[in-house]
């Protein structure tokens, strides 16, 4: 396989058009593994490559796999309607790379959100056929009761669903808090299931996807990190 020229490498990493990337190199704004390079035709090895652009280091990544601790007030859309896009919490070049959320969290839902520019990964993680379990911490309006938990475990009927939807597991963790695990990923599912079971969701936080938990990542709200192979393996394992 032919090696990529430096301008194409920069473009692939989201730094702009090829023309702009060539100008960056010619202006001395790009260092390759610590050495300034001014010839955009150079073909550095991408294995372990570290680019320094505008005095900031970026490790070359063929694909991006990202975890974000989403705060409230952001929409999981590239064209938001009423709130800022969640992508505004990430570096600008990720937008150039067409990074997209894996599924969606409502604007007022917080917690673990995956993002990627790998279409196959996005499909695998969001496809209903994969049955990827997702764990949520829900704060309820009324106290949690055993009949509520039993209804969620056995299944509740939503008006636009052909069959009842049930939680894989559902446990009380406080007077007005439950941990609920779902695998379907329907629109507003936790909120609608709680309403159908006779309660109301006051706050919702996703705390795990597959075998990957938010606690493992140590991210404060609004912070993000790259997912490395060990963490991606937890997602695949579920």
Image (cartoon, helix red, strand yellow):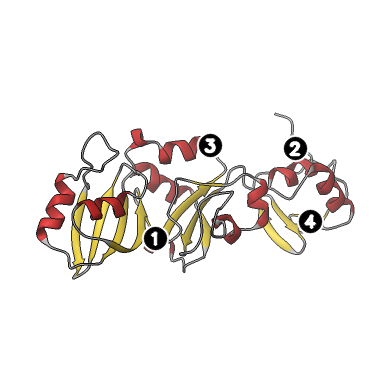
Mark closer to the chain start, 2 or 4:
2
Residue at x 45% of width, y 54% of height? 113
Q: Position of residue 132 (x, y in %)?
A: 34, 42
Mark closer to the chain start, 4 or 3:
4
Q: Quadrant of residue 175?
A: bottom left
In the image, taking residue 19 as reference, residue 232 lies left or right, namely: left
* Distance from the alpha carbon under mark 3 to that under mark 2: 22 Å
On residue 214, the disc is: 1
For label 1, the crowd category at 10 Å Cα-Cα, with few meaning under 14, some 14 to 19 and many 20 or more, is: some
**Which is closer to the viewer, label 4 or label 3?**
3
As displayed, is residue 150 above or below residue 122?
A: below
Q: Position of residue 179 (x, y in %)?
A: 25, 59
As displayed, is residue 59 above or below residue 56?
A: above
As displayed, is residue 40 above or below residue 30?
A: above
The furthest residue to the left:
147
- Of helix, strand and loop, which one carries label 1? helix
Residue carrying label 4: 31
* Distance from the alpha carbon under mark 2 to that under mark 4: 16 Å
Q: In which quadrant of the rendered image does the C terminus lie?
A: top left
* Distance from the alpha carbon under mark 3 to that under mark 1: 23 Å
Mark closer to the chain start, 3 or 1:
3
* Distance from the alpha carbon under mark 4 to that under mark 1: 34 Å
Mark closer to the chain start, 1 or 2:
2
**Which is closer to the viewer, label 3 or label 2?**
3
Q: Position of residue 152 (x, y in %)?
A: 18, 50
Residue at x 58% of width, y 61% of height? 89
Residue at x 75% of width, y 37% of height? 4
Residue carrying label 2: 4
Callout 4 touching callout 3 (CB < 8 Å): no
Residue carrying label 3: 119
């Amino acid at each position: 396989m032919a090696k990529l020229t430096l301008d194409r490498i920069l473009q692939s990493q989201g730094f702009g058009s090829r023309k702009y990337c060539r100008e960056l190199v010619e202006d001395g704004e790009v260092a390759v593994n610590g050495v300034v390079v001014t010839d955009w035709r150079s073909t550095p090895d991408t294995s372990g490559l570290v680019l320094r652009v505008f005095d900031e280091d970026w490790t070359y990544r063929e694909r991006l796999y990202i975890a974000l601790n989403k705060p409230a007030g952001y929409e999981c859309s590239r064209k938001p309607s009423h709130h800022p896009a969640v992508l505004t919490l990430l570096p600008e070049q990720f937008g150039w790379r067409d990074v997209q959320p894996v599924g969606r969290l409502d604007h007022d839902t917080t917690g673990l959100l995956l993002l990627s520019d790998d279409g196959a990964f996005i499909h695998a993680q969001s496809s209903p056929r994969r049955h990827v379990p997702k764990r949520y911490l829900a704060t309820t309006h009324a106290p949690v009761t055993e009949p509520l938990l039993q209804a969620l475990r056995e299944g509740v009927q939503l008006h636009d669903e052909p069959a009842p939807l049930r939680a894989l597991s559902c446990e009380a963790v406080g007077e007005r808090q439950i941990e609920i695990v779902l695998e379907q990923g329907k629109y507003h599912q936790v909120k609608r299931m709680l309403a159908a079971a006779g309660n109301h969701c006051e706050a919702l936080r996703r705390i795990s996807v597959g075998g990957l938990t938010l606690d493992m990542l140590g991210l404060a709200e609004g912070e993000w990190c790259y997912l490395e192979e060990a963490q991606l393996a937890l997602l695949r394992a579920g």
